[in-house]
Image (cartoon, helix red, strand yellow):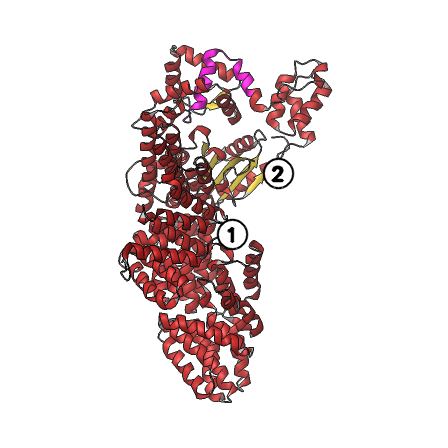
Amino acid sequence: MKGRQSERAELERLLDGVRAGMSGVLVLRGNAGIGKTTLLDHAVRSASALRVTRLAGVEAEQELGFAAVHRLLLPFLDRRADLPGPQLAALETAFGMKSGTAPDRFLVGLAVLTLLAGAARRQPLLVVCDDAQWLDRESLDVLAFVGRRLHADGIALLFALRDEPDAAAGLAGLPELAIPGLADTDARALLAEHADPTTDLLLRDRIIAEAAGNPLALRELARGAGSLRPSAAGRPLPVSRGLETRFLERVRQLPALARRAVLTAAADATGDRDLVRRALHRQVPSTPDEIDAAFEEAERADVLVPGPDVTDLLFRHPLIRSAVYTGAGRAERRAAHAALADVTDPLADPGRHAWHLASAADGPDVRVADALHACAERAKDNGGYLARAAFLHRAAELTEDTATGAARLLEACAAALMGGAPHRAEELLTQMAPAPEPFAAHVDRLRGLVHLMVGKEGAVGLLHNAALALASCDPQGSRDALLEAVDAAMVVPRIGPGTSMARVARTALDLRDRRTGPPQHSADPADLLLEGHARLAAVGHTEAAPVLRAALTAMRAPGAEHGGAVRWSLLGMLAAIETWDINALSECGQRYADAARSHGALRMLQIASHANATAEVFRGDLATAQLHFAEFKDVADATGADSRLSHPTDAMLHGWRGDETATLAAVRAQQELYPERPGGVPAQLVRAANVVLRLGQGLYAEAQAAAAPVLDDPPPHGGGLVLPGLVEAAVRNHDTGTAQRALDRLTERAEACATPWALGLLARSRAVMAAGAEADALFRDAAAHLDPTPLGTEKAHTHLLHGEWLRRRRRRGDARVHLRAAHEAFTRMGATAFAERARLELRATGEHPRRRNTPAPADLTPQETRIARMAADGATNQEIATHLFLSASTVEYHLAKVFRKLGVTSRRSLRTALPG
């Protein structure tokens, strides 16, 4: 602990906060031996009044899904009946305690959070996780999710992590504390405590230099340097090949049985002394006394240490376990695993039993490969996709038949993708180069999905080529690959050379006609979405709109949100925007959000939350839109998404609010991430926000410049959002040619869709270009279409434009009616730039409205507002917690703050105290 004052203070602040009822998470990151475990031990010793539970990642257990979190929760599982039903089912299915639908790992994470928070209500809790880089990926994702959701739960979560590239990437974004090497003074003080007093001074200097501030290296070097003669100071030190070599040399000095005992313990992940004892007896028949003596020899050599329980078997340092295992010969390791397989119950622990069998295998083994494949199927049922990938990969290695092995490797890659590990999937795909002919198309498809997930160009082209290759042998796979290609083309910033959205669309239509022949249509939402979006990109809105409407009807059918339509929900939400169907957008957003919450499907919840936010922007309820955007960001952060991509997605909200700083920040974020002109729907949303901002400010040249690319380089999706604004801006800039081109494009789309929203925008845009009585009639026509809809922003904008037109015709009295309505609506919704534009127009009519400031909010955060609204509607703390993926303790904490801010003392008072 020398030289660790600041690190100790940081840990003690964290623990003090937990004692006060708050929570915290900290990742200690540093090199092996730098002192992370020692700091964790210090935290445990300092955790007075806290219940402590410890966990350590083990290399041998990395491939067993949810294994680490299962070990962590063993002391708490007796209270699992207190969990809400969906959480209980997810947790028990993940742990193999019951069969059921594979759970989403984030629903498992919510169950873990609820269980730990419940325990912390009885006694504050410290959870310590050492060697997090060796946790199985499912457990790491669950614990990272818990760490991101902690707030007021009385829980501290500490991770220790090696400072290596990509180590435990799932923990990215959590608070970190880098553990540096010791300063020279502290290093010399530590060396003085451990070195023989007779050690030569030059040799001490060499030790200090060689250890580079690493405390473990200092101790180990000091241990071996004391007996050296002074002349040895100029020779390479005994550990010049690394600490693990030093540890291995010490182990090799042990008697044979002790060496075998240590290796068997290193091959086992359970730390169960009795299990290792029985496995050791299988390898070397020995008496219990002889085996106990072997363990004692290892403890005297500082290789093993006594655990808190007599049944525990612990290594003094994780590096020792690593050194022992990697330093042993292959035959010795196989023998240890074979013995462990013999003493592991294949019924109670089939995964670990099969894994030991696989590690014991020397070459192809059909029996073991089949056992691994069976474990992979169980892992899929439990939601352990990365465990499934590991089992299938090892099964492929042990499979002699080439085709069967390739099929298993392909399944392993797909499982890795499902588990959110695209880099692992990419690594597996390299083992199939060149891919056997029957699998080449599937490899292309998976590689395309990998490229999409890691942000590489070429995803759309790979998926398109895979669809073509699969068309004759796997029509369903071909269709899904095309849907994936369309989905990718919508979201990637650049499609890349060699393909385009139009090409993908033409292929989709050709293959559909080849399968069914025109003009038959499927009732499957996926088929309809593919055909509709393909027609949109290849032909236009006239042919696409009827199919997209049918797709939206299918997506709103009873139970559709729990079926296959979920997978393509983004395409459905975009179909609603492309057809200007506010009701479909609102209903799908709400229904699919509710379904996502019930399944714990946070990535689907992101899509639905964004759809709900967008719908509320168009409705003019910007405050509620902010809450949905806050949920979108919150969910993105909880899943570890890149905030540079997720956080600017509320640009439309800022544009309508007239917030120039926030809107232009989103524009700059796009430009910084993608210096070339980006494509995809995210870029179109940012462009639309910029157009709205500039229209509100009356900066028509800037608005036209922002919108113009939709004419010169028309995007396949999202361009319709700016066409009415482009007409308005071009007319104000006296550019009738551009205005007419934009109106022609808008006319084709709006007449094809024929929704009140579309027809209202079309009539309004025609009015902006018209003159005399025709314009007045068109404005009234626009209002007639829009008034029955919930489209608050569009109705207010129409009033503004109509009022401005009337004022310019010196019809001041009529103008005031519309301008007053616009001013009041924009002020009420908080659209400050448009409200000011309406106010100035009113002044020009002779009326002098005062600037109306939106009533000051109660200073509630979006999270507090969401909680308060649900509480006002009668939801319990646990129901709110489940809905928002929080703990009930955190909900209770936020509600207490809401009560203070609003000056109320009961839930019944919330309904009247909350604004709106």
Confirm or deny contact between disc 2 and disc 1 (CB under 8 A). Answer: no
Quarter of the image holding residue 631? bottom left
Specify whether residue 256 is painted magenta: yes
Q: Amino acid at mark 1?
A: Ser
Q: Residues within 10 Å of mark 1 (few under 14, many from 20)?
A: few
Specify whether residue 593 is painted magenta: no
Q: Nearer the viewer, residue 615 or 544?
A: 544
Q: CA distance from mark 2 to mark 1?
A: 29 Å
Q: Nearer the N terminus, badge 2 or badge 1?
A: 2
Relative to 510, 331 lies left or right: right
Q: Amino acid at mark 2?
A: Ser
What is the magenta range?
247-270
Q: Residues within 10 Å of mark 2 (few under 14, many from 20)?
A: few
Q: Quadrant of the C terminus?
A: bottom left
Q: Nearer the viewer, residue 828 or 822?
A: 822
Is residue 210 visible from the viewing direction of this image?
yes
- Residue labelled with disc 1: 643
Q: Secondary structure at mark 2?
A: helix
Could you tell me which residue is drawn at 43 percent across and 68 percent down? 618
**Looking at the image, is 557 positioned above or below residue 302?**
below
- Residue labelled with disc 2: 6
Q: Secondary structure at mark 1?
A: helix
Residue 824 x %, y %: 47, 77
Residue 607 x %, y %: 41, 55
Could you tell me which residue is drawn at 35 percent across and 57 percent down? 510
